Image: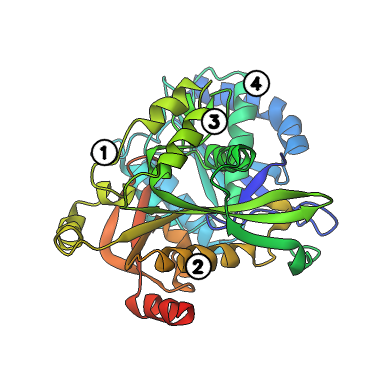
Amino acid sequence: MRNPSVSLAGPALHTGASVRVYAVTIAIAIAADAVRDHIVSVLGEAEAAINAKSSLAVTRSVQILGDQSNVLDWLQGYFLATREQPLVLISDMLKPPDDPTDGFLTRECQKRFSDCAMGTVAILPSQERVIDIDRTIRPDVSHDDLVHAMLMLLGRIEYLMAPAKHPPVDARSIVVRPLRNGNEAEFQSYFQMRHYVYSQMGYLREAIESSQARLEMNEADVHSLHLGAFCRRGCRDLLVGSARVVTNNGADPALIDLFEKIAEHDPVSRQSLKQPYPLGLPIFHTYRQMTPIIREIFSKRQKCGELSRVIVDQEFRGQGIAGRLIAAALERAVSRGLTRIFLECLRIHESLYEMHGFKRIPGFEATVIDVKRTMIAMELQPEIIAKISQGLA
């Protein structure tokens, strides 16, 4: 399977004849002299390997001196001067954001630059994932580990930038439809595509990211409507995009059996399938302010859903496939009787979802339960659901 790219989690850089290569600035803000010298040395040695394997070009490094405030001021000036040029910040000042003092830089980067093509690499004793930090490396990071971290991060940054123009794909060759419930191969590709994208985005726990099966699946999937975009290649359909709508309906027994079979030899995925969301939708576990909404849904016995996992393969970006996936997912959800549809996304994607009828729920911004990222909540507007319903009548 080719490496897919996120369509709604930020556009990726296309490959091929119309490639647009972005120059990436590396900002190094390391207080410890010995650590800074080591990182600068390893980065210099690794630059050729990084550039050889990425569509983005690491072209210059800048060392920022001073404390967290100085680093923040420098970043502010950088993005005011050139908002579209991507940047990677490597720093030992990036700490967990819940620390009242040491977490200042991380919190402010999230607050000020979450709509910019920026990636963060924290230098920490442990490589465990940290909320709102893209990657972590050790102070004595090896050449190979730094190359891996940078390639994953540059892949994520690609998703946050506007795509280059790409030769058009014949729209008739692309079919958007539900995945076939009994088709193990389709779902295998679907979960592997999600794993690749979410690994690049830094959303997965280490155990899931490094699992040999390379599957991104969880208990919400047995309650979901699953769709794919397929390109006809010869006598076979190639999966080039995906989307799901998690519902608060009961689990589908057929999906349970199928997914258990797919995860049969992957203990990590099997465990994920056994961890339910007690409140029904993943989004209900993120925001404390959702309590009144949840009560209303339960009291009125409303059928509701959550749109997520909208992905388009890199080769097929910029062809309107994401929009077709969203439209098909919403139409299918409404046809199944869902009257409220939510999503949670990065702030940088708010305007994109607004184009499809979603509106931000004011004041809802928190760390998403599964991905350790600060995101906003949005809901599809009632008039859009009514319009879809009329079209189905």
Mark-to-mark CA distance, 1 and 2? 29 Å
Q: What element carries label 4?
A: helix
Q: From the viewer's perspective, is the residue at label 1 or at label 2 nearer?
A: 2
Identify the residue at image location x=49%, y=74%: 355
Indicate which label's residue lies in the foreground, 2 or 3.
Answer: 3
List the residue tagged with mark 1: 98
Residue 262 - label: 3
Q: Which of marks 2 and 4 is nearer the N terminus?
A: 4
Sooner in the amino-acid sequence: mark 4 or mark 3:
4
Local crowd size for mark 3, using a 10 Å CA cut-off: few (<14), some (14–19), many (≥20): some
Precedes in sequence: disc 1 or disc 2? 1
Location of residue 93 (image quadrant): top left
Distance from disc 3 to disc 1, alpha carbons, whole Å, reads 38 Å
For label 2, the residue is: 352
> Is disc 1 placed on a helix, strand or loop?
loop
User: Tag on residue 309?
Assistant: none
- In space, the residues marked 2 and 4 are separated at their CA atoms by 38 Å
Residue type at the position of mark 3: Ile
Q: Residue 70: horizontal and vertical position, in percent?
A: 41, 46
Separation of residues labelled 1 and 4 (CA atoms): 30 Å
Which kind of residue does numbered mark 1 sit on? Asp
The disc, 3 or 1, on the residue closer to the chain's N-terminal end is 1
Which residue is pictured at 42% across the width and 63% down the height? 333
Q: Quadrant of residue 350?
A: bottom left
* Numbered tag placed on residue 143 in the rendering: 4
In this rendering, does residue 208 appear at all? yes
Q: Which one is in front in this view, the residue at disc 2 or the one at disc 4?
A: 2
Image location (x, y in percent) of residue 222: 41, 42
